Image (cartoon, rainbow, N blue to C red):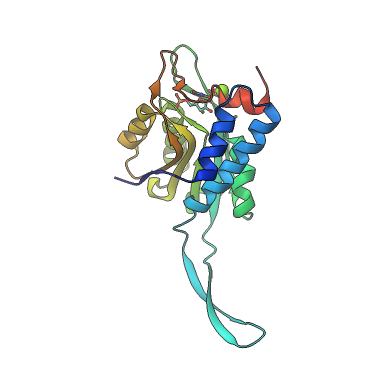
């Protein structure tokens, strides 16, 4: 079984409280969501490989470390995943970005695909699939199905990164994709009868884009 990590940090907890608050404005919600994603980027990049490099300081030659240049891509699940992209790009600015458009059917809670566009070498890249909400896990699993079945990406090269997860969603992804590492900023209590995370933060897409 791959890793399941709740990224614990006082700054993340504080900022999560801000976005959970129903009185937070669209502008603040969007800004703080990106800030949390940036803080999480520190953790999700922890295992990136390093190699030796010879440099000269003003005083002497020395062997130091640099990233190997292993190719990365961030894959936001539209729409809400877009709210995390800039925050992560702040730390890994050369990462490419692929997009998967999914919406949850309100009655069945099944994810419906409406868009997909990726870098041509997506199957060679380490992927950060990002979506603030992991609720039933239907959208996450649909995104992983698309990447692995249609684009030949390897599950062991994929990290799934959410801000708020429900236990039901984590279990659903782990059951279908045991090789995918999951990172979240919070593991909440449960889903309500409409498939919303409790306590959660509401509809992340609507709150990021001000559509409700
Ligand atoms: O785990 P699940 O039960 O699939 O729920 C999570 C999904 O629901 C939300 O998307 P939504 O369908 O509201 O689309 P949006 O991002 O365009 O608002 C959210 O951003 C996730 O993609
Ligand atoms: O609580 C939830 C569940 C799914 N999607 C959201 O945006 N919020
Ligand atoms: Mg939504």
Location of residue 83 with respect to 47 vertically, above or below: above
Q: Nearer the viewer, residue 184 or 18?
A: 18
Q: Residue at x 67, y 32 (%)?
A: 28
Residue furthest to the bottom in view is: 60
Quarter of the C terminus within the rendering: top right
Asked whether residue 154 appears in the rendered view, the answer is yes
Q: Nearer the viewer, residue 168 or 114?
A: 168
Location of residue 102 with respect to 105 vertically, above or below: below
The reply, left or right, for residue 123 in relation to residue 94 is left
Q: Residue at x 42, y 26 (%)?
A: 138
Q: Nearer the viewer, residue 44 or 22?
A: 22
Location of residue 50 with respect to 120 vertically, above or below: below
Q: Residue at x 67, y 84 (%)?
A: 58
Asked whether residue 121 appears in the rendered view, the answer is no
Q: x and y percent of residue 179 in the render? A: 34, 45
Count of numbered tags:
0
The image quadrant of residue 160 is top left
Q: x and y percent of residue 33 in the render? A: 60, 37
The reply, left or right, for residue 144 in relation to residue 18 is left
Quarter of the N terminus within the rendering: top left
Residue furthest to the right in view is: 27
Q: x and y percent of residue 55 in the render? A: 60, 81
């Amino acid at each position: 079984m791959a890793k399941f990590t709740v990224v614990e940090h006082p700054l993340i907890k504080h900022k999560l409280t801000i976005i959970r608050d129903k009185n937070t404005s669209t502008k603040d919600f969007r800004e703080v969501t990106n800030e949390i994603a940036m803080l999480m980027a520190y953790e999700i990049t922890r295992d990136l490989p390093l190699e030796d490099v010879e440099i000269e300081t003003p005083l002497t030659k020395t062997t130091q470390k640099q990233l190997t240049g292993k190719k990365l891509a961030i894959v936001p699940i539209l729409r809400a995943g877009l709210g995390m992209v800039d925050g992560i790009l702040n730390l890994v600015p050369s990462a490419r970005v692929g997009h998967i458009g999914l919406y949850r059917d309100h009655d069945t809670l099944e994810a419906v695909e409406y868009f997909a566009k990726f870098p041509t070498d997506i199957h060679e890249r380490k992927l950060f699939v990002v979506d603030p909400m992991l609720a039933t896990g239907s959208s996450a699993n649909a995104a992983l199905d698309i990447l692995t079945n249609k684009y030949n990406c390897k599950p062991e090269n994929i990290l799934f990164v959410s801000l708020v997860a429900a236990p039901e969603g984590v279990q659903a992804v782990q059951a279908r994709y045991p090789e995918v590492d999951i990172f979240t900023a919070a593991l909440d209590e449960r889903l309500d009868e409409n498939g919303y995370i409790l306590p959660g933060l509401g509809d992340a897409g609507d709150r990021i884009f001000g559509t409700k």
